[in-house]
Amino acid sequence: MNNKNKRKGYLLAGMLIVLAAIFIVGIFKLQQQDQSNPVETMGESDAQNSPGSDPSLEFHNAEPVVSPPPSEQTEESSSEEAVSPYLLDYLPFTEDEVKSVSVVHGGAKKKVPSERKEVLLQSLRFTDMQAAVTEVPSFAERTVLQFNLNNDQVIELPYYLESNAIAAEGKAYYANDQVMLLMHDLLKPDSELGVFAALEQRIRQEMEQGVLTEPQGVDREKIAVDGLIYAQWEDRLKNEEAEWEIPYYDYASGEVRKVAKYKAGVLYLYNQIVFSDSTHETPDGVKVGLTPQEVDNRLDAEASTLPSIWSYKSGDYFRFHLYYDNSKVKYMVLSQPL
């Protein structure tokens, strides 16, 4: 009897131990599940008060934002517009704002003809501030360029005729050759450059109004001056001393060049060699001072003619020109095609 009771006691104790073990294992598994899925175990009120619900902590567990390295930042900034080298971009006006231009020189004021205003603006537009820079003349006579704007504001820039330079912000920059001719036409109309510039302007106006023809070509030898064509004259002048020179900025080549005057009436401009002395002539005797009829009698070639210029074609280009003034040849011009 006692043995049966003992066995029952042992069996009951064993069952209790097994149940306790099962209970402990169950609790342990539930704890593991709660740790791996904390939000799932939260109630609605707990979720609302959790740190993750704070807008300031919204990306607390997101991937960190990595800034690009300095090299990549530099590449991005380099995509911005490059700094302009041209003078006009640093002046306090744009081309469209300029209503007119005046020139003040020696106490007198002259208005630049409206059709010539573009000459000054174009020079400013393409003047490279590094390639065209020069020193501001110390004792040279100063002219003032007045740019009259649409809002009635006036911007003034100094100009130096002797060095063909425009000053701005304490520095000076060479203008192009067309500004040089324009300013001599306005300020020194009786000078060699002034007289030539006035005739060239008249020719430009005739070209705008007239109709140019395409004549038959002429042999290069027929339009040589003193037996030399343009390239040969250019080589010859390199070895001769000029009577005077005036610099200008050639924006086509990005270089500073010079207009030069040589003896016996030879003027060397951009792509032009101009003869104003009757001592120079072609093989047929065409020279300065002849009338149109005398030219026709001596040079058996067709020309494209306007009242103030006859141009002769050699090859594919016009290379020889006669400028007329008062019904006589004023200049003979050899030109080099661009």
Image (tube, rainbow, N blue to C red):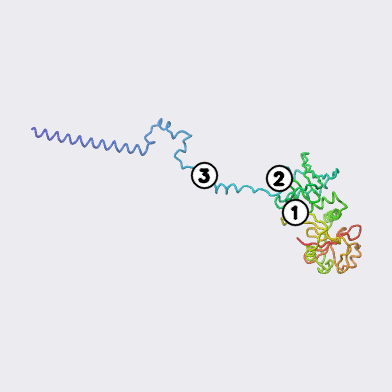
> Residue 314's image quarter?
bottom right
> Residue 157's image quarter?
top right
Q: Nearer the viewer, mark 1 or mark 3?
A: 1
Q: Secondary structure at mark 2?
A: helix
Q: From where the camera sits, is residue 126 visible?
A: no
Q: Check the image and report above or below for 115 versus 1.
A: below
Q: Nearer the viewer, residue 269 or 63?
A: 269
Whole-percent x, y for residue 125 in the image: 73, 49
* Cα gap from disc 1 to disc 3, whole angstroms: 47 Å
Q: Which residue is mark 2?
A: 90
| Numbered circle sitting on residue 223 | none
Q: Which residue is mark 3?
A: 67
Q: Would residue 198 be found to the left or right of residue 165 on screen?
A: right
Q: Would residue 129 be found to the left or right of residue 38 on screen?
A: right
Whole-percent x, y for residue 16 in the image: 20, 34
Q: Secondary structure at mark 3?
A: loop
Q: Which residue is mark 1?
A: 249
Q: Which amino acid type is marked by label 2?
A: Tyr
* Callout 3 crowding tier (Cα within 10 Å): few <14, some 14–19, many ≥20: few
Q: Check the image and report above or below for 125 versus 330.
A: above
Instruction: Return the disc, 2 or 1, that comes first in the chain's sequence.
Output: 2
Q: Nearer the viewer, mark 2 or mark 1?
A: 1
Q: Which amino acid type is marked by label 3?
A: Ser
Q: Which amino acid type is marked by label 1?
A: Tyr
Image quarter in which the N terminus is found: top left
Q: Secondary structure at mark 1?
A: strand
* Residues tagged 2 and 1 counted as in contact (Cβ below 8 A): no
